[in-house]
Amino acid sequence: MMHSKWKAPSDSPTLATKRNHLRRSGQPNLRSST
């Protein structure tokens, strides 16, 4: 999971930030739902 984080910013900082935010907001949300 961390590997994707490092590779994302290298490819696109803007997309990585958006994806990071979505993934970070989605992960805790899913965990809370479960």
Image: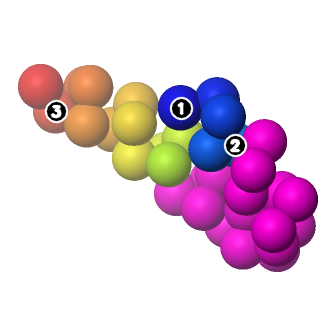
The residue lying at 82 percent from left, 72 percent from top is 12
Crowd tier of the residue under label 1, counting other residues whose Cα lies within 10 Å: few below 14, some 14–19, many 20 or above: few
Q: CA distance from mark 2 to mark 1?
A: 7 Å
Q: Is residue 9 magenta?
A: yes
Crowd tier of the residue under label 3, counting other residues whose Cα lies within 10 Å: few below 14, some 14–19, many 20 or above: few
**Label whose residue precedes the other's in the sequence (1 or 3):** 1
Answer yes or no: is residue 17 visible: no
- Eyeballing the image, is 15 above or below 30? below
Q: Which residue is mark 3?
A: 33
Q: Is residue 1 magenta?
A: no
Secondary structure, mark 3, is helix
Range of the magenta residues?
A: 6-22
Q: Which residue is mark 2?
A: 5
Q: Which of the two residues, 24 or 11, is positioned nearer the viewer here? A: 11
Q: Which residue is mark 1?
A: 1
Q: Quadrant of the C terminus?
A: top left
Q: CA distance from mark 3 to mark 2?
A: 24 Å
Q: CA distance from mark 1 to mark 3?
A: 20 Å
Report whether 1 appears left or right of 17: left
Residue 21 picture location, percent across and down: 63, 53
Residue 11 picture location, percent across and down: 81, 68
Query: Residue 5 occupies which quadrant of the picture?
Result: top right
Report whether 33 appears left or right of 30: left
The residue lying at 39 percent from left, 36 percent from top is 27
Give the residue type that dot 3 points to: Ser
Residue 14 picture location, percent across and down: 82, 74
Secondary structure, mark 1, is loop
- Eyeballing the image, is 12 above or below 10? below
Give the residue type that dot 2 points to: Lys
**Label whose residue precedes the other's in the sequence (3 or 2):** 2
Report whether 30 appears left or right of 4: left
Q: Are marks 2 and 1 in contact (CB under 8 Å)?
A: yes
